Image: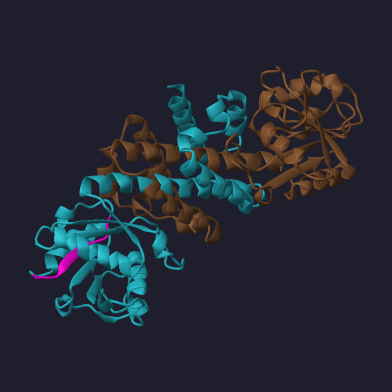
Chain colours: A brown, B cyan
Amino acid sequence: MISLSIIGTGNVAFHLANAFSSVQGVQLNYIVGRSTHALTDFKPLAKTTTDLSNIYSSKIILIAVSDSSIAEVSKKIKSTNSLILHTSGSTSLDILNLHNRRGVFYPLQTFSKNKHLIYKEIPFCIEALLQEDVLVLTELAEKINAKTFSINSTERASLHLAAVFSNNFCNHILTEAKMLCEDNNVSFDLLKPLMTETISKAFLLGPENSQTGPAKRGDLSTLEKQRNSLSSRQLELYNTLTHSILKFYER
Amino acid sequence: MISLSIIGTGNVAFHLANAFSSVQGVQLNYIVGRSTHALTDFKPLAKTTTDLSNIYSSKIILIAVSDSSIAEVSKKIKSTNSLILHTSGSTSLDILNLHNRRGVFYPLQTFSKNKHLIYKEIPFCIEALLQEDVLVLTELAEKINAKTFSINSTERASLHLAAVFSNNFCNHILTEAKMLCEDNNVSFDLLKPLMTETISKAFLLGPENSQTGPAKRGDLSTLEKQRNSLSSRQLELYNTLTHSILKFYER
């Protein structure tokens, strides 16, 4: 039995608390938040508290707070034999350097409160100071049927940056595509099969082999025609991305 | 029985020729190309020819050539009672204005020669000068189980622009993400579940409601840290997209 407490009340904390509260072999002890209000949604899942001193009996203490708060929270945790984890892609293991037993449990996925997740499809990138704790992290991930990958802090920072490109930037591009559709009364949903195929091709053939479109073809007249119907924010994206595609394929 | 000839030897021509050569109710007569060499791959599918004069007995003549060549090809087709179509998202119906029976048959999808397509999942955007020809186009799409949507030339241009953002730009961003992974010896494949979820969320919740990441959070210290490990081409994309996300969500 792995006993676990979670510090944090954001989307990652919410999803992991949900997952771990309902599996065999994990005892979800406490969820710690700064205010009782933030803890409301967590009450059905475990005991909730604003007081860190409650949680030291847990084998694992998982810090699932914003990247900029990890150091501060880590310092507040007293010397303990618990394994202290954070869940951040862009933060080094060393930020937990007050603790001998420290590790990282980074789910490479995007979390929204109202979207169900299937954990067996989420890669968990794990790292620990002590080899024995790598095994604990593997076991923890197995409880929710997730796969683990041993990734050190430097590799994880690269992976997180690639995830920012993949998820954050593509999602923003889709937001602009939706605006274009709405401005012209065509349904954004028509683009779903295209995007599903784009992602399928990118991982099957490689995105560098799947590039199509006017920039890839060097079709300057279509590029010029399309520029005329864009807002200034869209035009900036259009020009930068088009320029980057032209440059990439002229090599 | 719909008799059909296709002009063109690119990816769209190849996939449509393949699809129409193997369904009931369509007689694929000729594939027309500029050279016998370009026509090699089409020989198993239909008669091939470099001579347009062969094809006037077909009920439908489908021009599937690059956008910049449509006008030229259209002019070469003599006056005929055939329905003349192009397949371009960014080109008006009017470019076929020498022909009384003209239409557009635009598959909103990305085509690569070596990737199998499932037509029932591809929206075909159709337009025709004559109402009776809209029915012919609907029937043609039904032969390959595709859904049709009546979209006029202005709407189609917007949709094509949104498709450029969605497919071409996201795919290029994935190319840069793959470069980041390769530069740092982490597997690009780890990002597949993330991207699958990103697309699922974008069409379920709306991409504007699914945005996450350091730019959305206004997490300037993570943004600054990430900038330090990028090439100049990646940095230009990073800065433009980050700026655009910051601007979009400050509204």
Whether residue A169 sits left or right of residue B134 in the image: it is right
Residue at horizontal 24 percent and vertical 63 percent from the top? B137
Residue A9 vertical placement versus B50 (above, below): above
Q: Nearer the viewer, residue A108 or B171?
A: A108
Residue at horizontal 50 percent and vertical 58 percent from the top? A201
Q: Where is residue B68 in the image (x, y as percent from the top left)?
A: 23, 57
Q: Position of residue A106 (x, y in %)?
A: 71, 40
Q: Look at the image and say whether residue B144 sits in the magenta stretch.
A: no
Q: Where is residue A234 in the image (x, y as percent from the top left)?
A: 36, 35
**Would residue B233 be seen by someone viewing this image from the given angle?**
no
Residue extent of the magenta highlight = B80-88
Q: Position of residue A226 (x, y in %)?
A: 28, 43
Residue A238 vertical placement versus A208 (above, below): above
Whether residue B41 sits left or right of residue B170 in the image: it is left
**Would residue B10 be seen by someone viewing this image from the given angle?**
yes
Q: Nearer the viewer, residue B106 or A247?
A: B106
How many numbered discs? Answer: 0
Residue ranking furthest to the right: A81
Give the position of the N terminus of chain A as an image quadrant.
top right
Q: Which of A215 and B169 is in front in this view?
A: B169
The quadrant in which residue A217 appears is bottom left
Q: Look at the image and say whether residue B82 sits in the magenta stretch.
A: yes
Residue at horizontal 42 percent and vertical 46 percent from the top? B166
Whether residue B142 sits left or right of residue A4 in the image: it is left
Whether residue B220 sits left or right of residue B100 in the image: it is right
Residue at horizontal 55 percent and vertical 49 percent from the top? B196
